[in-house]
Amino acid sequence: MRINRRDFLFQAGGGLSGLAFASMLHGQSPYAAKQGHHPARAKAVISLFMCGGVSQMDSFDRKPMLDKYAGHPLTGKGDVVVRQGHPGPLMPSPFTWKRYGQSGLEVSELFPTIGAAHADKLALIRSVVGKSNDHVQAHYELATGVIRMGYPSVGSWITYGLGTENQSLPSFVVIFDARGGPFGGPANWSAGFMPAAYQGTVLRSAGDPIMDLHPPASISQEDQRTRLKLLEKLNQLDIERNPGNSELAARISAYELAYRMQGAAPEAVDTQKESAATKHLYGLDDAITEPFGRQCLMARRLVERGVRYVQLYHGGLGNQNTDTWDAHDDIRSNHTKHAAEVDRPIAGLLSDLAGRGLLDSTLVVWQGEFGRMPISQRGMGRDHNPGAMSIWMAGAKIGGGQIIGSTDEFGYKAAEQPVSVHDLHATILHLTGLDHKRLTYRFQGRDMRLTDVEGELVPQIVA
Amino acid sequence: MVLGLALILFIAVDFERDVRPVFEQSCVKCHGGAAGAMAGLDLRNPASTRKVIQAGNPEASRLFRVIAGFDKPAMPLGGAALTKPQIEAIREWIASGAEQTASQTTGAKPWPYRLPQDTANASIDKFIDRKLAENQLAAKAPRADHQMLIRRLALDLTGLPPEAADFPLTYAQAVDKYLASPAYGERWGRHWLDVARYADSNGFEHDFNRPNAWRYRDYAIRAFNENKPFDQFLREQISGDEFDEPSNDALIATGFLRNYAKVGFREKDNPEFRLEYLDDMIATLGRGVMGLTVQCARCHNHKFDSIAKSDYDRMKASLWGYVEVDHPLVPREEAARWEQTNQAIQARLQAVRQQLATLEKPYKDQLLPAKLKRFPQAAQDAIAMPEAQRTPGQVLLANQILRTTSVSSAEAARIMPADAKSQRQDLLDRAAAIETQRPAPIPVAAGITDGDFRFTPDGPGDEPAPGKGIQRAAIEGAFLFQGAGKYRVPPGSEIDPGFPAMLVSGTPPVALPPVHGRTSGRRRALAEWLVSKQNPMTARVFVNRVWHHHFGRGIVASLDNFGRMGEPPSHPELLDWLALRFQESGWDVKALHRLILSSNAYQRSSSFDHADNQGKDAANAYLWRFRAQRLEAEAVRDQILAASGSLNLAMGGPAIFPPLPAEVKAQMLHGIWEKQEDGPQTWRRSVYVYRKRGLPFPLFEAFDLPDQNITCNRRNTTTVPTQALTLMNNEFVLKQAGRLANRIKELTLDRARQIDLAYQFTLARPPREDERALAQEYLQSGSLDGLAHVLFNTSEFLYLR
C-alpha cells in the first residue's frame, strides 16, 4: 500500500489539522523540535554497534610486544580476570597490518576498505574503558551509561533534548542484524524512566518496517480510509463535548502522524530505487556484505529524512558464537568473517555521506560493548576485556586521522587518556548541540542525566 | 518582551536549587552538620546564616567575601574552592534578598515528617471546597450523569466496563457491587504490582523464567479482594517468614522483596550483585512505602531530604541477612519427607553415575588426543610437554585446554565393544528407573528468609564457575531454613539495623526475633515500625496512592517522593485526615474507597469547562471538575476483550502467553515465551499476561507500560502514533472488533439496534443523534466490523471520565 502523503485527513479535516498542529506547537507533542544548548555540529548520529566485542589488538591497536612475548603469561598487571574458564598466555594477532592515508593510521587486514578510503577521516580512541565484562551489562552501559536495565538510551536523550524534524518518521530508529537482536534486547533502546515516546523504534529491513504499520490484507486501503474518516468525526464531536482537554486534540494528531508514517516509513527504508552504483558502494551486490550494507544504506536514507539517531547492530544472537564478534573460540575465523561483512558497507556509508555533503553534519560512531584480551583462550580465541576498547568517530567535522589515548604494551588496559563511557556520551551529546550537564530529566526527585554526575568531553573530538 | 521575561525567570537564583546544594556539599560538614556549628555558624539555620549576610549587599557579606577569596581565611577551609557559577549563584542569592528556608535539621520537623494532624468536623468535600474558595475557583462542575458515573465506577474499581444490569443500580449499590467483585482485586492488585516491580522473569542476559512468581501476583490480587488490612499486607510482604507461625500467604508474600531484576549468572562468585539487590529493596520500600528516595543516600547524605548515609546503611542492615528461598507450601513434616526421599534418590543416582564414569573412562581417554588435534601447534607442544617441564605460559595453555576439553558419554559409547555397551545401557536404564521414583514436586513460593547466601541451595544462575566459588565450611547458625537453632546474621554489615532518624519517634525496637529463632527479626521490626502509629509516612503514602488512582493525581502528585524535591501537597490537611481515618479503621482499604467515592468531588462531571478556572488552575489540582484519565495498557486490552464478549474471567494460576508476532519473538534471547493460541485460553485479563523483563508485551508497551525493573508509582501517559498504529492495525484488535460485530449480529439484525448495542458494549451508553447519523452513514458502505473497530479507537473508549 502506498499512500499519498497529502492524504484525505488533511483535506477533509483541514481546520482540525490546524488545531492539532497548534497543540503540538504548545509543547504537547513530545516530538516537537527543540533548540539545543549550543549550535550543533551533528544533526544526526549513526551508531554502528559490533555486538560481541571487537578485539582491539586485531583491528585498530597494533601491539608488536605481543609477538615478542607470545606464549608468556600476562604478569605484573594485577589479578587477570577472565570471563570464561582460565587465563591463557599472551597471543599475538594473527593478522597483518598496513598504514593508510596521510595520517599513516595503522589498520589490520580486517578492514582494508575502511583503511584505504577513510583512514584520514577517523578519530580513533584507543583507550575507552567500560565497567562490565558481561555482554548484556556492557551493552547497557554503552546504550544508557548504566550497566543495569531501566535507563534511557542515548537516542532517547537526544530525542528528548531535540525533538524531531520529520514528524512522519520516528526520531530514534533501531535496525538490527537479520540473525537476531543484540545482547540485552529492547532495554538497549528503551526510554527507561522517560515517557515511552522517546524510546527507539525498531525498523525491519524486510516487510513492514514498523510493527502494525499497515492493516492486514483483509482490510483494504479504502476500508481503512473510511474507518479513519468516521473516527475523526466522532473524535471531533467528542472534543466539542469535552472542552478544555488538550490530550484529545493530541490524540487526533497522533492518528494523523500514524497515517503519514504508513507512507513515509516504507519509503524511507526502500532501497530499491537507489542507483546501481550506490548499491555497489554498500556491497548490496555481494551476498556477504548485502545484509549490513542494506542496514547502512537505510541509515543514510533515514538521516537524509531528518531522523536524529540511527542505531545499527551488527551481529545477532541467532548463535552467539558464530553470529557475533564474540571470538572466544577462534579470533582468526570469527573476526575475518564478521569484518568481511561490515568493511565495505561501512566504507560505503562514509563515502556516500561524504559524497552527498551529509558527513559534515552526521556523526558516525563505530563501537562494540568491550575490547578483548591480549591473552589467548586455548591458543586461538580471546576473552572479554572491558579494560580497553578501540572505537572511532567520523563526520561532524571531527579531525580525522588522529589517535586519541593509548593502551599498555599489550593492549590490556587503557594507559594514556582513559575515556569512560560517560565521556563518550558527553561528547556525543555535545556534538548534537546538547550540554550533558544541562540535559536533565526529573525522576525520583532528582534531575537525572545521561552522564550521571560524570562525563568529560573528549577534547580532541570537540576541538 | 516575552523573551526578556523568560530570560529573567531563567537566571533567577533559587535557594533550593542553586544554593542549598552548595551549602550541603561544601559547607555544612563544619557549619551545621554532624561536626556542629564551627565559629557559631549553622548554615542550615536561616537565623544563623543571617549573621554572615547583609541581604541585598553581597560585597558587604562575610559569607560572600570568604568564598570569593576577598577575606581570609578563604572558604571552604582546606577544601576545593567553590566554582565560579557556585560563587555567582550565592552572590545573586544574597543580592536578591537571601531568602532561605530552614533545613530540616533545625527546629520542628517540617511536613511530611510530622505525624498527621487531625481536623475536627471535617469531610473530604469541606477540605476541597475550602481550597477552591481560597484559590477563587468559583465554578464547580455539576454531578456527572448516572450513566457516566456507573461507567466511571466500573472502570475505576474493576478495570472492566459496566454490564447492562448495572445501570439500574443506585450509585451506592454500584460501589458495593464493584468492590465485592473479584475483578476489583485484579485491578487494584495490579496497581500494587507496579509498586512491587513484579515480573515473571529475571531480566538481564539470561532472563530466567520464575516459575513460581505468579503466586505472589495472585496473593496481591487475593489480598485486595479479601480486604486484607493494609498494615497486615505490609507485614506479610516484608517479614511473613518471620512470623511466629507463618501462614502460606505470609510466605508467598515475601516474594515482594525478591521481585528485583536479577543477573542470574554466577551469583555466588559475585557477592557484589547482592548490594544492588539490597539497594533495589531499599528503593522499593523507600519510594513505594515510605514516599522517600532513601536510596539517594547510598553514597552520600541526601542532598535535599534529611536522610543520612547512615540511615541508608541502617536500613540495609535490617535487610542484610536476606536470602532467596523457595518456601514449601505444605506442612513442614511433609516438606522434610519430600526432601529426604529426594536426597535418597539423588544418592542412588550418584552411585550409578559413578559406575558409569568408571566404565567409560578408558574409552574417553582413548578418544581425547584426537580431540586435542584442532588446537594450534603451540598448544600441542604445551600438552605434549611433561607437566614439570612446561614453561609458565605452557602451564596456562595446557590447563585451559585440558580442563575444557572432554569426550562425551555418547562418543565413548560409539567405540565400546558390545559387552561394555550393554553394561552401559544397563546402567543408564537403572538411572532412568530411579529417576521415575522421584516424588512429584511440592508447591513452593519464591520468597526470602534470613540466612547466609553462600550456603543456600544453588538456583539457576547461582552455580559458581568451575574451579571457582567462595563456598566454604558453613558458619554455625548462618542458614537455618530447615534445621533448628538460633540464627546469626552473617558478617559484612557491622552496622546496627535501624530506621531513618528523621522519621523516628521514641525508640522502636530494631529486631523482634520470632519464637522459632530461624530469622533475626530485623525485617519484622522494620515492618512493625512502618505500620505503627508513630510512623508519619506509611498511611499517608498509601492513602495518597489510592487517591491518585481515583482522581488521576495524588494529593501529593509525586506519589513516591514526599520529600523536598517532590511536589508539594495540594490538600495537606485532607491527606492527614484521610491517613488518620485509614489508621482508625484498621487500615481498611475498601472503607477508604467508600469514603473517597462518597465525596461530591469524585462524582463531578469531567466534561465541564470554565475559562476562569482554566486560567487559575489548568491542571485541575483543586478538583473543580473530575479529571478524565487515559486508561492503562492493561485496561485498554481488557476493555476490548470485554466489549467483544471474549473475556475469559478465570482467575489466578500460571501466566498466559498471548501469541507474539515472529519479529518480536526474534528479539527474545533467553528465557521463555510459551506457544499458546490466540483464543479463550489467552483472552484472560491482562494482569495474567506473562511479564517478561527482557521483552515487554508490545500492546502494553505502546500504552506506556512502565519499566518492569524498578518500583513504579505513577505511570507515564503519552499520546503517540504507535498507539494509533496499534489500535488501527493490530491483528488482535481487529479480530476482537470482528468478534464484537458478531456478538451484535447474533443479538439483532436491525441496523439501528446494532448501532445501539455497539455503543452500549464499547462506551456503555447509547449513541447521541449526531453519532447515530454518522454511524448510519458509515454503515451504508462500511461494515459492522468497521464500526466496532472505530469505536475501539475513539478517545472516549480509552478514557475513564
Image (cartoon, grey):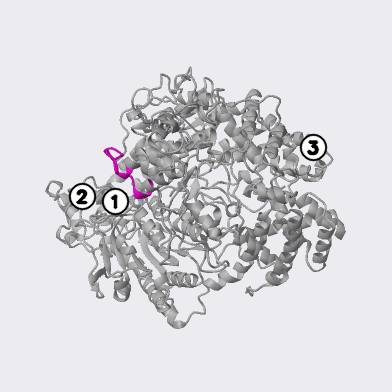
Q: Quadrant of residue B98?
A: top left
| Residue that carries the numbered disc 3 in the rendered image | B171
| Residue that carries the numbered disc 1 in the rendered image | B405
Q: Nearer the viewer, residue B512 or B3?
A: B3
List x then y, in percent, for residue B743: 79, 54
Whether residue B202 is visible here, answered yes or no, is: no
Which residue is at 40% across, 79% downward?
A: A355
List x then y, in percent, for residue B636: 67, 50
A454 lies above or below A123: above
- Residue, far bottom: A276
User: Distance between the Cα atoms at labels 3 and 1?
Assistant: 74 Å
Residue B71 in the magenta stretch? The answer is: yes
Q: Nearer the viewer, residue A14 or A206?
A: A14
Q: Circle 3 marks a residue in which chain?
A: B
User: Closer to the observer: label 1 or label 2?
Assistant: 2
B303 lies above or below A437: above
| Residue that carries the numbered disc 2 in the rendered image | B396
* Prevalent SS, magenta region: loop
